[in-house]
Image: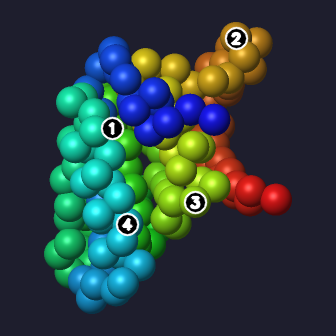
Amino acid sequence: MLSIEDHLRELPSPVTLLYYTPDVPSAATRAERELLEELARRADRVEVRVLAERWDGAREARVGIARTPAIVPLGAKDYGIRYYGSPDGYELETFLSIVRAVSEGRSGLSPATAERLRGSDTPLHLEVLHAPT
């Protein structure tokens, strides 16, 4: 298993993590924020921006946030990734892989799958649920 530093070492492009929190903080959201800030301290190309204002339905709709807390990893562009839940424990390695993929500007899709999706005019909404067991 790679360390946090190994995952974040020499990221090719900067990544900004927008962290949308509920307007009433909890122990869980404080822990998530501390984790994200720690990741930013360990990687010179990762920045965290906390958006802890009251829920603004119009703003969240523009960004594509369905609920809080949510993390939006941005690289050279917005790839549409919305991470819900706490990226700790078993999920940390998956989250760090997302940060690296965003930095590298890659989706992880096979070339054939990417080509097939490019040929579609139908909007696609994909949710991936990750369970460590």
Which residue sits at x=57%, y=25%? 107
Question: Mark on residue 3?
Answer: none
Cα separation between marks 4 and 3: 11 Å
Q: Which residue is mark 3?
A: 89
- Where is mark 4, residue-wise? 32
Instruction: Tell me if 105 is positioned left or right of 45 in this view.
Output: right
Residue 65 position in % (x across, y down): 41, 62
Which circle, 4 or 1, is nearer the viewer? 4
How far apart marks 2 and 3 lie (CA) works out to 31 Å
Q: CA distance from mark 2 to mark 1?
A: 22 Å
Question: Which image quarter is the C terminus in?
Answer: bottom right
Pointer 2 or 4: first along the chain = 4
Give the quadrant of residue 69: bottom left
**Mark 1: few/some/many CA within 10 Å (<14, 14-19, 20+):** many
The residue pinned by badge 1 equals: 74
34 versus 63 height, above or below: below
Is any part of residue 103 visible from this angle?
yes
